Amino acid sequence: MKPTPNDNPLTSSIQYIKGVGPKLGALFSKKGISTIEDALFFAPREYQDRSKLTKVRDLVPGRPATVFARVVSGRSLSLRGGNRFNRFSRGGFRSGFEATVKDETGLLNLFWFNAFPTLKEEFKPGQLVVLFGNVEMNGAQLRIAHPDFELIEEKDGPGLLHGQSTSFGRVVPIYSETEGLTQKVIRRVVHTALNSSLPYLNDPLPESTRTRLGLPTLRDSVMDLHYPANPPMMGELPEKTSRLVFEEFFALELGLMLKKKGKAMFTAPELSQGGAVDEFAKHLPFALTDGQLEAIRVLVRDIGKREPMTRLLQGDVGCGKTVVALAAAAVAARSGYQVAFMAPTEILAEQHIKNAERYLKPMGISFGLLSSSADDKKRTMELLANGKCQVAIGTHALFQADVQFAKLGLVIVDEQHRFGVNQRNELMRKSGKKLVPHLLMMTATPIPRSLALTAYGDLDITTIREKPAGRQPIDTKIFYEAGRQKLYEQIAATLGRGEQVYVIYPLIEESEKVDLKSASKMFETFRDELFPGAKVGLLHGKMESEEKDRILETFRRKEIEILISTTVIEVGIDVPNATLMVIEHPERLGLSQLHQLRGRVGRGGLKGRCYLITKARSPRLQIFTETEDGFRIAEEDLKIRGPGEFMGTRQSGMPGFRLADLQRDSHWLLEAKEEAERILEHDPELKQKENAGIRDLVESRWKSRLDNLRSG
Ligand code: ADP
Ligand code: MG
């Protein structure tokens, strides 16, 4: 069923665009594009200048070019060893295709490793075609492998290239792709959105601001974002989009200034039953650490206010953030409001359910699991809508538009750095017009202060520095292949003590299938040859989530002793009796990721061990063996990988912004600050008519604080 458009086509579902059904719609949603407006603001990751045609004679190897040519011949090839080209494989076609095209100056070869069968139909002798790609030398011949192309009708000739094609004859946007979403599809959908809905975009900036700063209209700049008149330089944005950058900073600055003046635009519910914490603590089997107590104190103070909290709780793996969050949840529930507790994976959500059973149930607080595969999803949704379920624990499913809360007061986001691309925040909108829920995010990956400031504007940070008492340092060692036997002896010794073992086999995305095979092979070797007497299990991300849960549950019950696993267990898994973690191919992982993994052991009072097995010496891994300080490890990671790894900064911008980049665009930040001051001086609460647009702008940007939950 086609969703019907709203009155405002901008907020209509992307599925309203022709050719976008539920399936494509879901893929777009994954990219943070749920509405037509989202599509308008979906920034290309780069641009290709395909405005000028190059004659074959003038092609330069190593450079991209657009060529207008006629097909001479095309033929299919059967490529032996096609497996090697697996990553090109779409739908399992393994045959190659080769074509020769020509213009009046010469011949050009085209080549595909994995060809759709349709290519044979398309590349018929005499067919006119326009194509784009990187020119290379193949022996003495010029060649373009995997060109982007469009067939041209005889009657259109090169005339078609004047503004009619979305892919040729102009500067062309290149978007980041996802499996199932090709450039062509994204381009077509965005282009349709531009054509149909651009006129509905209202400019929030007052005329006077635009004139003063010489900024183009919103419509012009959005058009330029996708189809710029001039190709921008590498790493730069098209000229007219600077206005969008300004707007982002402007909304941020206005919001910050209003807040400072005590004129915050939103109120949050006062979750004031702070006494619930004592009751909560009574059910804990341990005493809270000072760090936990302090964190809870700050949280309870903040959520008791009418001003919406936006707080990041950071603390190294194993420091016990979950109970802190649950304490806040208990306060919210006791105060008559609902809580949404979001985890990045189903496994983790289920684990939080177990915690809720332990700590919330005795208080009589109701809770439910909402993940895409949870059995009684419908029932849980009903209970959320009528307010009978107080704490919803789940994955992204919590974000979905059809999930309604009766009285949402607190949103908790666990492992916030793990969240996917630009998760659109539906949750914040669920809470009614002016009332927004408090927001608590948790992470084990500390973020630099400067980022925190700009990313959220109003982000407050609480850090838990100590670990629960009784934790012993984790013995971290590197083994080389020659020492493999010794490593196995350690595994045997661990089993002998009645403790359990993780063996991590990280997959590399490009060769996932091959690696998965190696992981399965390893599982068989462990089960059949190395430890035939032990119970060995296998866990990986490609399994159905029910299967994953079942295996983890079995592991938790100690019915699996050695768990061979991919990095799916990286975040948050908590099985105190598992004390040894062996990591194969540690060189494939970032230090912070290794640290997260290591955090899975040494959780109870038992001594934890983490053994890496690798081929070559590496100073990076050496550092890892020397410290357990998550902050230091994050710093080392930062040195090696750059700040892009933090909180999902993408190449084109800062977290929290669609386009703006603090470094590149710092002068716009200054302009925005000055302009915000100027406007507020005349209209301190943005009540004047000409400022209605910016008032809406600030509201919507600040209301969508969860928009910032994205990672690269
Ligand atoms: P993380 O901060 O990495 O999310 P968890 O919340 O998963 O850590 O807690 C790690 C383990 O420590 C859990 O088994 C939890 O029950 C336990 N724990 C939490 N707080 C304490 C405490 N104060 N004393 C002892 N154990 C604790
Ligand atoms: Mg955790």
Image (cartoon, rainbow, N blue to C red):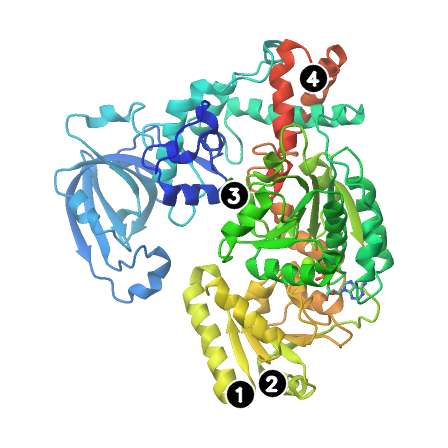
- Residue located 49% across and 58% down the image: 375
- Residue in front for this viewpoint, 285 or 168: 285
Disc 4 target residue: 675
Disc 1 vs disc 2: Cβ atoms closer than 8 Å? yes
| Circle 1 SS class | helix
| Circle 2 SS class | helix
Disc 1 target residue: 530
Disc 2 target residue: 488
* Apparent side of residue 146 relative to residue 533 in the rendered image (left or right): left
Q: CA distance from mark 4 to mark 3?
A: 37 Å
Q: Earlier in the sequence, mark 3 or mark 1?
A: 3
Dot 1 crowding, Cα within 10 Å, few <14, some 14–19, many 20+: some
Q: CA distance from mark 2 to mark 4?
A: 66 Å
Q: Amino acid at mark 1?
A: Leu
| Circle 4 SS class | helix
Q: Earlier in the sequence, mark 3 or mark 2?
A: 3
Which is in the foreground here, disc 4 or disc 3? 3
- Residue in front for this viewpoint, 399 or 408: 408
Disc 3 vs disc 1: Cβ atoms closer than 8 Å? no
Most extreme residue toward the bottom is 533
Residue 176, placed above or below residue 266: below
On the image, the x and y values in percent for residue 643 come to 65, 46
Q: Earlier in the sequence, mark 4 or mark 1?
A: 1
Dot 2 crowding, Cα within 10 Å, few <14, some 14–19, many 20+: some
Q: Does residue 144 appear in the picture of this structure?
A: yes
Q: Amino acid at mark 4?
A: Glu
Q: Earlier in the sequence, mark 1 or mark 2?
A: 2
Disc 4 vs disc 3: Cβ atoms closer than 8 Å? no
- Residue in front for this viewpoint, 294 or 55: 294
Q: CA distance from mark 4 to mark 1?
A: 70 Å
Which is in the foreground here, disc 3 or disc 2? 3
